[in-house]
Image (tube, helix red, strand yellow):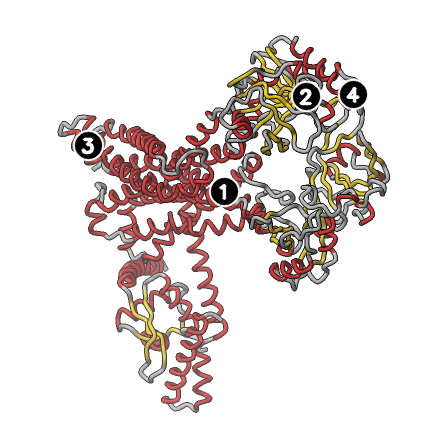
């Protein structure tokens, strides 16, 4: 594993999945994994296997829906899409995330000022 | 491997294939590409494991959460929860109790190994007139069947001793005794706890008499001593050696068992009533085959004059069927009544859940709009029902367990001898099985209905709910409950009506305030008995509070009879016969129609006078006057008897027995020689009713008069009458109890639904009161919502009753199952009670303060 890649923050994978689906639309598991890696500019080392439990959790919460379909290369894959509840959830999480990261940002600024 | 597991596998496989393809496109070799893809994926097994665990936890979490929420909600609404739980407990409790009874009486009435092989073997003879009859088999018949080892593995005979045996001792005691032959225990798979079973020799006349002790008697009389074998039981007419002790579960009510013996000169005699035969079929033999094989072997019957009798067959009947069939109607009726109660309970709880649920409609609508799936909402509401039903069932089983003994003691059923009724595992399993439809019935329907809550209607209306469907739904539930309760009440009403007719039946004598004492002098000189009874009667007549006394061999209501055939003017007439001392007929208040009662001078050595009843007079002498006429006992060399009086018919067997009607009865003066030495006479007294300690006085007097006396029983005629009508009485009490339970549950339901209706319409009522509606108007508006369905339900219930009540036709005494007066009165009671319940609840509407209710808007 490349040493300077950041591990996906615990609990944030779900948010990344929701955001990815919101931005691009329905897609299958492998595409989602690649997409997250690509958007992060390959800075995130996604342990792709952990994606599937996360997808299941999201499905259970009713935020995403899954149905069987075909990949671009004709394989049988599950295609995930965002539900309306998922979209609301995403808005909520995004706002939360921004507030949280804003706060943390401010802390870093403070520490810069004092140092 | 579950479906989800397979799906995950296939999904991961696709993922890896896609990734591999991409790496190949980037120029890696297939192997390298596959490896890279796997590396990116991380641990496949691990991923699957995490997936699986999360799945499980999600389910568990949900369930735990559902139940937690359900419990919180239930404890918050304490009154409604309590009512639902008690309602369910009653429903499930009566069901469990009934299951226990069904389990013992219908499922395993014969708790012996392979009880389906157990049969009763009987003889059937063709009569010259084309009829058939079944005399009890002869000993020879049984020996013949015992030899048929191609049909049976074991055959054994048994017979109860009609009068029991008198066991000697400082205080002589009459004990019920069971008789059976060798093989009887083997047949039932029983081995003696101590000692040995009977063998063939024990059953032969002339060999030493042996006895088996019942477990209870062994414990009480012999202190459960292990060295009891070889000791003697002393009867007043002989001795038996104890050879064994029976296990506790077998024939516990029989203190003593003696070998069944038939005197040598009677072994070929059928119809003695002293022998019944049981057999165990070989496993490979059917009932039908057994019947054919045995019948082919039955010897031809010949009359004493050598003429051939009609055909003789062996009849083989399943004992299991026989044990079950006698109780089938009662069990069916009870099951029906209990099912109705359970249904009412379910409707009640459904109504409560719906009512509470409707108040939650806005909340549910919000949750639905926030994305909660409908399935999840239904599940959460079902959780509430499951918790309710679970607690209700636990309470119910406790209730059944606590009330079972009292219930069993009063069951109008023939209870199996050796299969005790208890709440056992099978019963618990049935109760659990019953819970599933119960929960579905009262839980799922409201849950589904409520889960349809939609934002616009539910939220827009806000607190002024009153969605018409719910109101109509509530009314339907009230109607349903009323209808169900009416069916139960109709049954109860008919039983009560019928029982009232039983007790009002004219018995032909005054059965009130009579005291009876069965007493027997243990003097072997039977001629001295007359002297004993005469002296005892004289003394009893001096007791304060006793206005008259007499003596009879078989007291009316006491059970027991004897018959004979009498010949008047050359015509034979079968008749019941009684032996009485002068004063008996006067004491019981028999009604003299002609002539006079018996006097001292009518004795067999004197005038030879008898009193007969109207039926006997009619049968023997036709329409003419009977007094002064004579008749003889058939084949009796003694001089004829002269009729000195005619009395009205006496219902000797009590009011219900159909044989009580039109029974010829002849009352002979007492003659000791004509009675059985161990047959105790009954002294009958009429008391003033205020005679405390009479029983003690009588007992002391009976013992004081004679040297050695057995006082068998001192009973009041009311007790005896009660015993005669015990089965209809128990049926009536049971069905009345169930009817009352049904009514109570229905009233609770009506009260609850109306209360809910008041709560639901509080804002509306507030507005109306604010605009000047009077209290009466407000209450009647609410009341109308309940009264209309009560009336509709009553009408439906009446119609249903007409369909259902014929089931209890055989329970009814001179009462039609569709008797209009009874049905109309129970309907009236139900409507009245229902309206009162609704009114009690609706009254609260008048107390609504518009200021408060409107502020809440």
Classify B570 as above or below B364.
above
Disc 3 or 2, which lies upstream in sequence? 2
In the displayed structure, B150 sits above or below B85; it is below
Camera-side residue of B491 and B671: B671
Q: Earlier in the sequence, mark 4 or mark 1?
A: 1
How far across and down, in percent of the image, does residue B180 sit?
73, 44
Tell me the residue that label 3 is attached to. B766
Q: Mark 1 falls within which chain? A: B
Q: Give the left or right position of residue B639, taking residue B484 as reference.
A: right
Alpha-carbon span between mark 4 and mark 3: 86 Å
Q: Earlier in the sequence, mark 4 or mark 2?
A: 2
Which image quadrant is residue B839 in? top left
Q: Quadrant of residue B600?
A: top right
Taking depth in this image into account, of B813 and A90 the one nearest to the observer is B813
Callout 4 environment at 10 Å: few (<14), some (14 to 19), or many (20+)? some
Question: Residue at 54% of width from left, 27% of height from top?
Answer: B621
Residue under mark 2: which chain is it in?
A: B
Query: Which quadrant of the rendered structure holds the C terminus of chain B?
Result: top left
Residue for badge 4 = B708
The residue that label 1 is drawn on is B330
C-alpha gap between disc 4 and disc 2: 21 Å
Residue B670 - label: 2
Residues marked 4 and 3 touching at CB (< 8 Å): no
State which mark lies toward you, 1 or 3.
1
Which quadrant would residue B473 be assigned to in this image? top left
Q: Which mark sits nearer the N-terminus, 1 or 3?
A: 1
Foreground mark, 3 or 2, reads: 2
Secondary structure state at the residue bearing disc 4: loop
Looking at the rendered structure, whether the residues under marks 2 and 1 are on a common chain is answered as yes
């Amino acid at each position: 594993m490349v040493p300077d890649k950041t591990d996906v923050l615990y609990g944030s994978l779900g948010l990344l999945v929701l955001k990815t689906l919101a931005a691009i639309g329905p897609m299958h598991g492998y595409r989602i994994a690649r997409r997250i890696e690509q958007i992060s500019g390959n800075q995130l080392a996604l342990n792709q296997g952990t994606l599937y439990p996360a997808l299941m959790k999201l499905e259970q919460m009713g935020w995403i829906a899954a149905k069987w379909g075909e990949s671009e290369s004709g394989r049988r894959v599950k295609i995930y899409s965002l539900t309306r509840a998922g979209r609301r959830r995403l808005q909520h999480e995004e706002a939360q995330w921004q507030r949280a990261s804003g706060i943390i940002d401010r802390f870093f600024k403070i520490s810069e000022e004092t140092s | 491997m579950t479906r989800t597991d397979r799906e995950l596998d296939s999904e991961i496989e696709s993922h890896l294939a896609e990734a591999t393809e991409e790496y190949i496109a980037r120029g890696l070799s297939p192997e390298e590409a596959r490896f890279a893809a796997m590396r990116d994926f991380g641990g496949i097994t691990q991923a699957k494991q995490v997936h699986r665990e999360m799945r499980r936890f999600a389910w568990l979490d949900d369930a735990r959460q559902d139940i937690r929420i359900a419990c919180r909600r239930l404890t918050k609404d304490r009154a409604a929860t309590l009512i639902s739980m008690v309602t369910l407990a009653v429903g499930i409790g009566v069901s469990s109790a009934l299951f226990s009874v069904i389990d013992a009486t219908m499922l395993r009435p014969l708790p012996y190994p392979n009880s389906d092989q157990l049969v009763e073997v009987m003889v059937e003879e063709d009569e010259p007139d084309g009829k058939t009859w079944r005399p009890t088999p002869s000993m020879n018949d049984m020996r013949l069947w015992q030899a048929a080892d191609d049909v049976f593995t074991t055959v054994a005979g048994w017979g109860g001793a009609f009068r029991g045996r008198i066991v000697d001792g400082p205080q002589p005691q009459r004990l019920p005794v069971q008789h059976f032959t060798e093989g009887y225990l083997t047949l039932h798979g029983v081995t003696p706890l101590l000692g040995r079973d009977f063998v063939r020799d024990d059953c032969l006349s002339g060999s030493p008499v042996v006895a088996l002790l019942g477990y209870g008697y062994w414990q009480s009389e012999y202190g459960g001593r292990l060295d009891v074998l070889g000791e003697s039981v002393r009867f007043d007419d002989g001795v038996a050696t104890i050879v064994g002790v029976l296990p506790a579960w077998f024939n516990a009510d029989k203190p003593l068992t003696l070998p069944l013996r038939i005197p040598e000169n009677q072994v070929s005699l059928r119809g003695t009533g002293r022998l019944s035969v049981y057999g165990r079929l070989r496993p490979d033999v059917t009932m039908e085959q057994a019947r054919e094989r045995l019948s082919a072997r039955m010897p031809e019957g010949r009359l004493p004059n050598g003429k051939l009798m009609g055909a003789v067959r062996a009849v083989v009947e399943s004992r299991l069927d026989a044990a079950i069939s006698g109780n089938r109607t009662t069990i069916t009726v009870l099951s029906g009544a209990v099912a109705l109660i359970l249904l009412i309970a379910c409707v009640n709880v459904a109504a409560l859940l719906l009512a509470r649920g409707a108040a939650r409609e806005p909340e549910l609508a919000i949750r639905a709009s926030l994305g909660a799936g409908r399935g999840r909402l239904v599940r959460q509401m079902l959780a509430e029902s499951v918790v309710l039903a679970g607690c209700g069932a636990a309470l119910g089983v406790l209730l059944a367990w606590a009330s079972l003994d009292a219930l069993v003691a009063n069951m109008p059923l023939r209870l199996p001898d050796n299969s005790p009724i208890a709440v056992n595992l099978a019963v618990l399993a049935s109760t659990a099985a019953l819970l599933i439809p119960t929960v579905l019935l009262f839980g799922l329907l409201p849950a589904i209905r409520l889960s349809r809550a939609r934002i616009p209607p539910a939220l827009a209306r806000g607190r002024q709910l009153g969605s018409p469907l719910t109101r109509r739904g509530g009314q339907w539930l009230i109607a349903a409950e009323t209808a169900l309760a009416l069916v139960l009440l109709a049954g109860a009403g008919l039983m009560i009506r019928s029982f009232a007719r039983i007790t009002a039946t004219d018995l032909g004598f005054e059965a009130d305030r009579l005291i009876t004492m069965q007493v027997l002098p243990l003097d072997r000189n039977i001629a001295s008995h007359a002297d004993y009874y005469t002296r005892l009667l004289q003394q009893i007549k001096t007791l304060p509070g006793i206005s008259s006394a007499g003596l009879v061999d078989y007291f009316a209501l006491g059970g027991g009879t004897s018959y004979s055939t009498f010949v008047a003017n050359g015509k034979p007439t079968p008749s019941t016969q009684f032996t009485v001392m002068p004063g008996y007929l006067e004491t019981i208040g028999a009604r003299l129609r002609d002539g006079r009662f018996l006097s001292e001078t009518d004795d067999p050595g004197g005038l030879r006078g008898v009193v007969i009843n109207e039926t006997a007079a009619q049968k023997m002498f036709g329409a003419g006057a009977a007094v002064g006429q004579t008749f003889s006992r058939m084949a009796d060399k003694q001089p004829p008897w002269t009729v000195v009086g005619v009395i009205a018919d006496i219902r000797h067997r009590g009011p219900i027995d159909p044989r009580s009607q039109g029974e010829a009865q002849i009352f002979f003066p007492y003659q000791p020689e004509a009675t059985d030495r161990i047959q105790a006479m009954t002294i009958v007294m009429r008391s003033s009713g205020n005679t405390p300690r009479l029983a003690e006085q009588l007992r002391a007097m009976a013992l004081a008069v004679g040297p050695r006396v057995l006082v068998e029983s001192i009973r009041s005629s009311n007790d005896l009458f009660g015993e005669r009508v015990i089965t209809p009485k128990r049926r009536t009490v049971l069905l009345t109890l169930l009817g009352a339970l049904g009514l109570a549950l229905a009233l609770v339901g009506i009260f609850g639904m109306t209360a809910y209706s008041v709560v639901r319409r509080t804002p509306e009522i507030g507005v109306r009161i604010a605009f000047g509606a009077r209290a009466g108007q407000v209450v009647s508006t609410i009341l109308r919502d309940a009264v209309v369905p009560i009336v509709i339900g009553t009408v439906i219930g009446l119609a249903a009753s007409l369909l259902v009540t014929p089931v209890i036709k055989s329970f009814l005494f001179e009462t039609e199952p569709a008797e209009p007066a009874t049905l109309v009165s129970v309907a009236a009671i139900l409507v009245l009670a229902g309206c009162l319940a609704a009114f009690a609840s609706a009254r609260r509407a008048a107390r609504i303060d518009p200021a408060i209710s409107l502020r809440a808007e």
